[in-house]
Image (cartoon, helix red, strand yellow):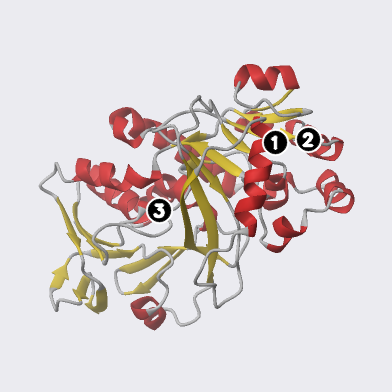
């Protein structure tokens, strides 16, 4: 079988990985010179801890297994089973963490509640005034700026893989066939569109009422910290964002401990990951209303800097990069991804939202199973 994959972000690349691994020929087409969207503008987190019970959690757990398997084969991915700590600074935050540890699937996430002394044993860089932390041992991380290139370089070792960049697919004129903006036809047996947040053009023509929205976020990266951050780190605002923590204790947190205005207005949480070079990737915000701003605003960065410095108990290194990104998110909150046929022998796979980096290996595996690869 010859499979045409459109989109060379992490989701498209993982589909190419699945197809090639199952013995098929792959033509991989990317409209940019290389992936430049959400796949390289994220934290690189393989985030199990906050996923909702059921299909989302099962997908994340399976993806975590696959990331580890691929990471053992490709050290350049920078896979690290580092786990995460969600820092707790108030009694209301502590109550949410206690409820999570007592939840029915806490063992699947490998959750435990740590005392302040134990927090500093696990992650000595957290010197701030804490009541404790929620530890998720199943969380992990990879290096997002290089992951696609490393995966594609491995795929290119096979003569059954062809990567074509700088080509935008404009049409599906026949089953298993696409036409690009150079006028070239690419023939195969099946087409899978993994176009990320690019929801116009051909995607809009194929699915005018796609049940997917675009979400914009802001992030930043520091100079090297000068010490090791042994886990990824979140603050308790992540409880408000991730569905795993919903319940009476979260309701009480919302009622008794409202977010600061900047965090509320920008739908913020703190996530922080140390990169291979020692720098910190820090975010993020969520903007849902179109049209999106074309610029980044400073208030969220100032808020995040204050939160991080309180947790670390030290000044943050200088900020070296700031950026915004956009990802596609299913409107159905229970859907892990939107996967549907859009033409004869052609499927669209998009809308994983903030789960894209985490869940892409398992999403691609499910596509491969459903399409009979």
Q: Are marks 3 and 2 in contact (CB under 8 Å)?
A: no
For mark 3, what is the residue? 39
- Image mark for residue 140: none
In the rendering, at what x and y percent does residue 9 appear? Answer: 34, 55
Name the N-terminal-most of marks 3 and 1.
3
- Image mark for residue 89: 2
For mark 1, what is the residue? 310
Question: Secondary structure beneath disc 1?
Answer: helix
- Quadrant in the picture for residue 106: top right
Question: Secondary structure beneath disc 2?
Answer: loop
Question: Marks 3 and 1, Cα distance to the nearest angstrom?
Answer: 30 Å
Question: Marks 3 and 2, Cα distance to the nearest angstrom?
Answer: 32 Å
**80, above or below 242, in the image:** above
**91, above or below 335, in the image:** above
Residue 323 shown left or right of residue 91 in the figure = left
Name the N-terminal-most of marks 3 and 2.
3
Residue 94 shown left or right of residue 224 in the figure = right
Residue 69 shown left or right of residue 165 in the figure = right
């Amino acid at each position: 079988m010859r499979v045409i994959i459109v989109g060379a972000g992490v989701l498209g690349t993982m589909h190419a990985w699945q197809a090639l691994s199952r013995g098929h020929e792959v033509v991989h087409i990317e409209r940019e010179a290389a992936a430049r969207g959400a796949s390289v503008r994220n934290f690189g987190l393989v985030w199990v801890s906050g996923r909702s019970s059921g299909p989302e959690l099962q997908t994340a757990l399976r993806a975590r297994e696959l990331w580890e398997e691929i990471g053992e084969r490709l050290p350049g991915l920078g896979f690290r089973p580092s786990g995460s700590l969600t820092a707790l600074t108030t009694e209301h935050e502590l109550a949410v963490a206690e409820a999570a540890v007592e939840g029915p699937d806490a063992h699947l996430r490998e959750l435990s509640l740590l005392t302040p002394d134990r927090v500093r044993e696990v992650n000595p860089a957290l010197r701030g005034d804490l009541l404790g932390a929620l530890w998720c041992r199943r969380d992990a991380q990879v290096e997002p700026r290089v992951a696609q290139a490393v995966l594609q370089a491995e795929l290119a070792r096979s003569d059954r893989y062809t990567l074509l960049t700088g080509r935008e697919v404009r049409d599906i004129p026949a089953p298993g066939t696409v036409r690009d903006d150079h006028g070239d036809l690419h023939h195969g047996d099946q087409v899978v569109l993994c176009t990320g947040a690019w929801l116009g053009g051909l995607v809009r023509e194929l699915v005018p009422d796609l049940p997917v929205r675009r979400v914009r976020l802001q992030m930043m990266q520091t100079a090297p910290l000068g010490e090791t951050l042994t886990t990824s780190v979140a603050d308790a605002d992540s409880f408000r964002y991730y569905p795993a923590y919903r319940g009476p204790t979260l309701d009480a947190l919302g009622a008794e401990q409202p977010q600061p205005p900047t965090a509320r207005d920008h739908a913020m949480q703190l996530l922080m990951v140390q990169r291979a070079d020692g720098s910190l990737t820090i975010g993020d915000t969520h903007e849902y209303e179109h049209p999106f701003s074309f610029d980044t605003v400073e208030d969220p960065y100032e808020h995040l800097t204050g939160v991080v410095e309180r947790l670390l108990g030290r000044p943050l290194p200088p900020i070296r990069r700031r950026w915004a990104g956009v990802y596609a998110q299913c409107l159905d909150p229970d859907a892990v991804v939107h996967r549907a046929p859009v033409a004869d022998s052609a499927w669209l796979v998009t809308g994983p939202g903030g789960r894209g980096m985490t869940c892409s290996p398992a999403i691609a595996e499910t596509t491969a199973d459903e399409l009979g690869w």
